[in-house]
């Protein structure tokens, strides 16, 4: 039991370092591992989001302390994200999340290329919040609940792709994710309940330990470096999803 708990602590630590530093990939990383172990999709998503209530809360506070937050952006994302998350969690019990993943993966692949292109163009360090933030938060919440992850890849990638400062986007999206995750977890608790608590506990401990380090990394990394990293991660993740979707 302790050996298995240590594995989940390590998994939570690594996933949160990536998520806190890049604003994405916690849910995708953890979900892929749990699904490969045979955990059902709805249970996987419920476990991931139960753990993320604690990890995103810690990460959001760390980003706030590090000065990586734009409150206006958070306010524009949070309510639509919570509504979308509740709808997605409820729908997952009836509609397979795999049906929408190929379309999202294709979108993210194109967006990752755009981000890399923008990384090598002169840009301002000021936040440029694009239009359409509320719909973005809504669909990000749906995708996150149904796919066991996806809030960061969709929301962070889109905002960075449209020219917002990567450091501020990553911090703001991480803080907003706490409220979205809390809503998703509450919906799962009311519909299918929560189980596999040893997995949740390990993910929580590992994620909370990693959150402060990831926030500091975002504060000190150059914007161009963050954009290049985000772009590469998005391309790799989306290409992998498309490949396995075609192969499957």
Image (cartoon, rainbow, N blue to C red):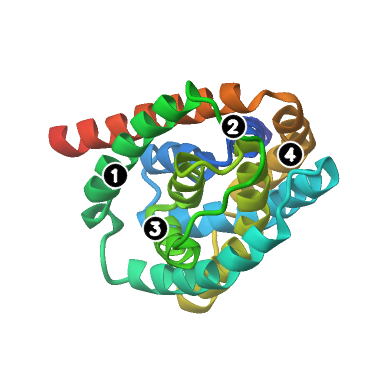
Answer whether labels 3 and 4 touch (C-beta < 8 Å): no
Q: Is residue 168 above or below residue 109?
A: below
Q: Name the residue under label 3.
A: 143
Query: For this view, does 230 lie left or right of residue 170?
Result: left
Does label 3 or label 4 sit earlier along the sequence? 3
Which structural element holds mark 3? helix
Q: Residue at x 73, y 55 (%)?
A: 57
Q: Quadrant of the C terminus?
A: top left
Residue 184's spot in the image, x, y percent? Answer: 53, 67
- Between the C-alphas of marks 1 and 2, the distance is 21 Å
Residue 52's spot in the image, x, y percent? Answer: 62, 53
Q: Quadrant of residue 97?
A: bottom left
Which structural element holds mark 1? helix
Which structural element holds mark 4? helix
Answer whether labels 1 and 3 touch (C-beta < 8 Å): no
Q: In this view, does 87 lie above or below 210?
A: below
Answer whether labels 3 and 2 touch (C-beta < 8 Å): no
Does label 2 or label 4 sit earlier along the sequence? 2
Q: In this view, does 101 lie above or below 194?
A: above
- Between the C-alphas of marks 4 and 1, the distance is 28 Å
Work out whether residue 16 can be spotted: no
| Label ID, residue 18 | 2
Q: Which of marks 4 and 1 is in front?
A: 1
| Label ID, residue 107 | 1
Does label 4 or label 1 sit earlier along the sequence? 1
Residue 154's spot in the image, x, y percent? Answer: 43, 48
Residue 149's spot in the image, x, y percent? Answer: 46, 50
Q: Which of marks 1 and 3 is in front?
A: 1
Query: For this view, does 112 lie left or right of residue 241?
Result: right
- Between the C-alphas of marks 3 and 2, the distance is 19 Å
Q: Residue at x 57, y 70 (%)?
A: 183
Q: Residue at x 41, y 74 (%)?
A: 87
């Amino acid at each position: 039991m302790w050996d298995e708990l240590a594995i989940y602590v390590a998994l939570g630590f690594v996933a949160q370092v990536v998520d806190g530093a890049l604003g994405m990939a916690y849910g995708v990383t953890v979900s892929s591992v749990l699904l490969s172990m045979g955990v059902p999709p709805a249970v996987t998503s419920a476990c991931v989001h139960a753990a993320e209530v604690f990890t995103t809360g810690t990460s959001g506070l760390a980003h706030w302390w590090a000065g990586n937050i734009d409150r206006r952006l958070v306010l524009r994302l949070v309510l639509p994200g919570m509504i979308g998350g509740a709808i997605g969690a409820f729908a997952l019990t009836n509609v397979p999340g795999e049906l929408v993943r190929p379309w999202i993966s294709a979108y993210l692949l194109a967006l990752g290329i755009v981000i890399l292109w923008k990384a090598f163009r002169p840009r301002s360090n000021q936040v440029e919040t694009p239009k359409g933030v509320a719909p973005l938060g809504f669909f990000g919440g749906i995708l996150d609940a149904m796919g066991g992850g996806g809030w960061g890849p969709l929301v962070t990638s889109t905002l960075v792709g449209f020219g917002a400062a990567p450091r501020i986007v990553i911090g703001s999206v991480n803080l907003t994710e706490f409220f979205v995750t809390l809503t998703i977890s509450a919906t799962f608790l009311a519909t299918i309940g929560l189980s596999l608590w040893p997995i949740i506990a390990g993910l929580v401990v590992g994620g909370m330990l990693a959150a402060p380090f990831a926030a500091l990394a975002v504060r000190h990394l150059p914007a161009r470096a963050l954009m290049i990293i985000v772009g590469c991660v998005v391309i790799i993740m989306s290409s992998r999803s498309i490949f396995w979707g075609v192969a499957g």
